[in-house]
Image (tube, rainbow, N blue to C red):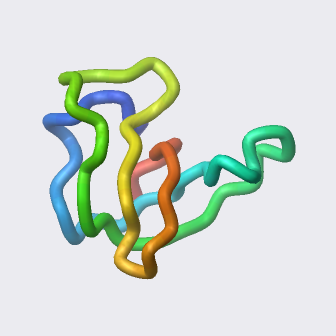
């Protein structure tokens, strides 16, 4: 499932995110959602979240 709809994202779910510094490489980082940072109902590049380990990125895949 893609991470473009805010309604699909809840704290605690496992996701793959693209960190800001990895935009050019497309490298994905796994983790669990701590906070949802995007306020709009959807975003074409993925909902921005903070993971439990403190990293911030846009969701590319919901596991």
Q: Is residue 52 left or right of residue 7?
A: right
Asked if residue 54 is positioned above or below residue 40 in the image, the reply reads: below
Determine the residue located farthest toward the bottom in the rendered image.
53
Residue, x 83% and y 39% (percent of image)?
24
Q: Is residue 44 left or right of residue 39?
A: right
Residue, x 46% and y 46% (percent of image)?
59
Q: Is residue 21 left or right of residue 11?
A: right
Asked if residue 50 is positioned above or below residue 25 in the image, the reply reads: below
Q: Position of residue 14 (x, y in %)?
A: 36, 67
Residue, x 27% and y 29% (percent of image)?
5
Asked if residue 33 is positioned above or below residue 54 in the image, the reply reads: above
Q: Looking at the image, which is closer to me, 29 or 55?
A: 55
Q: Looking at the image, which is closer to me, 63 or 54?
A: 54
Q: Position of residue 27 (x, y in %)?
A: 75, 54
Q: Is residue 38 left or right of residue 19?
A: left
Q: Looking at the image, which is closer to me, 45 or 21?
A: 21
Q: Position of residue 16 (x, y in %)?
A: 51, 58
Quadrant in which the C terminus is drawn: bottom left
Q: Quadrant of residue 15?
A: bottom left
Quadrant in which the N terminus is drawn: top left
């Amino acid at each position: 499932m893609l991470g473009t709809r805010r309604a699909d994202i809840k704290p605690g779910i496992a996701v793959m995110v693209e960190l800001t510094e990895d935009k050019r490489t497309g490298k994905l980082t796994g983790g669990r959602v701590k906070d949802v940072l995007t306020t709009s109902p959807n975003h074409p590049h993925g909902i921005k979240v903070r993971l439990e380990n403190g990293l911030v990125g846009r969701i590319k895949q919901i596991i």
